[in-house]
Image (cartoon, rainbow, N blue to C red):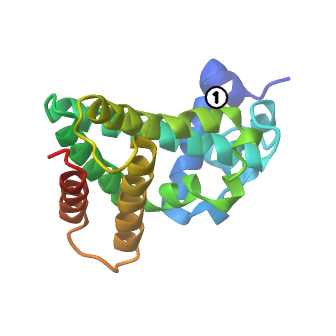
Amino acid sequence: MKSESAWHFEGDLRAALIEAAREIVERDGAAALSLRGVARATGVSAMAPYHHFKDRAALVASVAAEGFDRLYSDKMAALAASGGDPAQRIIAGSIAYVRFVLEHPELYRLMKSPELADRDAHPGLAAAAARPGASLQAMLSELAVAGRLHGIGAGEAGQILWALVHGIGTLAVDSYLGNPEALAADGAAVLLAGWGAL
């Protein structure tokens, strides 16, 4: 039998649990996350989360997937605002990626946690995590087809650009870098220029 609080959420309980979990992560870090704590934050019984998540790992994977969905949404909004040229969209996407890391440092740490490295165990997370990279690969492939990518393949170029924004974002969060968004823009532009895309 459901508790009154669980009845109150009805079909939205899973989403409410993930949102509460994300807030805990962003405020206190991933180590503070537990099914019992999420139940308490959501106002449902201690057993209610188990109807949606078999264990803590499943909850963590769902929070990370939601983080990748947010990252992808932020990135696509930046791409849409940057115009039609794929090189300029890549630069805009690089800035958006770093901005996301800066705005959600604990969530980003969770998204990239070794705890979630086995993507096969979490298909929903794997699908969400693949979307930001797939959008970058599509733009690099567009440059390659247009003859604007020299001396490197789209796959390798994507890995280098991802390493750039991941490195800048995490170093900035740990206070090792200033002006991270400008560094992301300049770094992406230098790489693209070196490959003949600008």
- Viewer-proximal residue among 4 and 123: 123
Q: Quadrant of residue 170?
A: bottom left
Helix, strand or loop for disc 1: helix
Residue at the image point whose x is 27% and y is 42% from the top: 149
Say whether residue 191 is left or right of residue 4: left
Depth order, front residue of 51/44: 51
Query: Is residue 27 depicted above or below 197 in this figure?
Result: below
Q: Residue at x 69, y 22 (%)?
A: 7
Residue at (13%, 31%) from the top-left corner?
83
Q: Amino acid at mark 1?
A: Leu
**Residue found at the far bottom of this picture:** 176
Question: Residue at 25% across / 66% down in the picture?
Answer: 180
Q: Is residue 180 left or right of residue 69?
A: left
Can residue 17 be spotted in the picture?
no
Q: Nearer the viewer, residue 83 or 156?
A: 156
Q: Find residue 11 and report its image quarter.
A: top right
Task: For label 1, count other residues whose C-alpha is less than 10 Å away and answer few (under 14), some (14-19) or many (20+).
Answer: many
Where does the image place residue 115, in percent across and percent down from the top left? Answer: 70, 58
**Disc 1: which residue:** 13
Residue 61 in sight here: yes
Q: Position of residue 175 (x, y in %)?
A: 34, 78
Q: Residue furthest top?
A: 11
Which quadrant would the N terminus be assigned to in this image? top right
